[in-house]
Amino acid sequence: MKHEIHSVDQAQQVLNESFYAMDVEVLAPLPDWTASFAVGGDDTVMIGDLHLGVDVRVDAGELGAYHVNLPLSGRLVFRQGRSGPWLASATHAGVYLPTGHTIVDRWSGDCRIIAVKISRAELENHLSLILDAPVRGPIDLTPELDVSRGAGAAWARLARMVAADTSDAGLTGHPVIGARLRETLVSGLLTASGHRYRDAMERHRPALAAPGAIRRVAEAMRAQPGRPFTVADLAAIAGVGVRSLQLGFQRYAGMPPMTYLRQLRLGLVHEELRRAAPGTTVAQVAYRYGFTHHSRFAAAYRRRYGVTPSHTLHC
């Protein structure tokens, strides 16, 4: 959702509703200014493209969530708990933990940021799935993330892409694609940031998921084929880590879990098109089973069945 804002009170209201309860103080008043906010996401991951247009100080208290401020221009000076001050800029994003009093000493008027809020449960549960082990949070992410190179730069590109798609019609709002994009943001941050679990992530050699765990996941897919499953969702159903699930599916099903799900959905679409009542459209059936990109769906369908979906529907 996009907002054009002309007062500090209005800006504070949008920030409070989308991110955290905070106090915003103007440091260098201007007679005429406009802020621009574009915000989207859900309770697990919220992302915003935020430009205030005037220098401010922000007191956000204790966040209760993990957060990244990625400046596209300008700079932002912040502190959290006894740590700081730290400088966030176009080359180094600012990373915040769920605990510790959080203050932005100066958010410059020319500073446009991509703000990413990740719920504490989402990040910590995701890491526990990667490690196949419980995680005791909060995870001590380092307060600066180098986004000028390597994994940090890749994560920043993804965050900018997701932030650019926050409109109501965007793919980030789709129940399947949006969930996967948000999941990738979370796993990418864990990979790009420094924290005490990094060595364990790199050393971890997952065990193969047992056949019973693979069977539970397959049954869940068949029971709710249109549900917007992510790999993390499926791993939670299996009771194993993401990598263990992937290895288990490759061993026992001959393909990754998301490929298995796609093949299952294609088969169900095929059967429904064969039995479809008059007036049914291909798009209706495909969308019901999680296919949102028509040309890709049609190509996958033709590769599997040798005909177009519309041919099956009208035969």
Image (cartoon, rainbow, N blue to C red):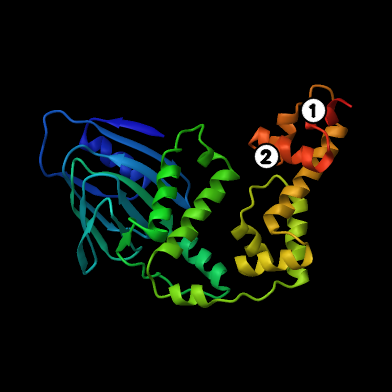
Q: x, y percentage for residue 31?
A: 11, 29
Residue that protrudes farthest toward the top in the picture: 279
Few, some or many residues within 10 Å of mark 2 (<14, 14–19, 20+): many
Residue at label 2? 291
Q: x, y percentage for residue 307?
A: 83, 34
Instruction: Please state which of residues 146 and 95 is positioned toward the viewer in this rendering.
Output: 146
Q: x, y percentage for residue 106?
A: 17, 50
Residue located at (62% from left, 67% from top): 243
Q: Residue 310 bears which disc, if any?
A: 1
Task: Tell me which amino acid carries mark 1.
Answer: Ser
Relative horizontal placement of residue 183, taking residue 218 as reference (left or right):
left
Residue located at (67% from left, 38% from top): 296
Closer to the observer: label 2 or label 1? Answer: 1
Residue located at (33% from left, 50% from top): 20
Few, some or many residues within 10 Å of mark 1 (<14, 14–19, 20+): few
Query: Which type of secondary structure does the marked residue at label 2 adopt?
Result: loop
Q: x, y percentage for residue 258?
A: 68, 54
Mark closest to the chain's N terminus, 2 or 1: 2
Residue located at (15% from left, 28% from top): 32
Task: Tell me which amino acid carries mark 2.
Answer: Phe
Residue 176 appears in which quarter of the rendering? top right
Query: Which type of secondary structure does the marked residue at label 1 adopt?
Result: helix
Instruction: Please state which of residues 152 and 53 is positioned toward the viewer in this rendering.
Output: 152
Quadrant including the C terminus: top right
Residue 64 appears in which quarter of the rendering? bottom left
Relative horizontal placement of residue 129, taking residue 298 as reference (left or right):
left
Can residue 239 be seen here? The reply is: no
Can residue 217 be seen here? The reply is: yes
Q: Are marks 2 and 1 in contact (CB under 8 Å)?
A: no
Mark 2 vs mark 1, CA separation in Å? 15 Å
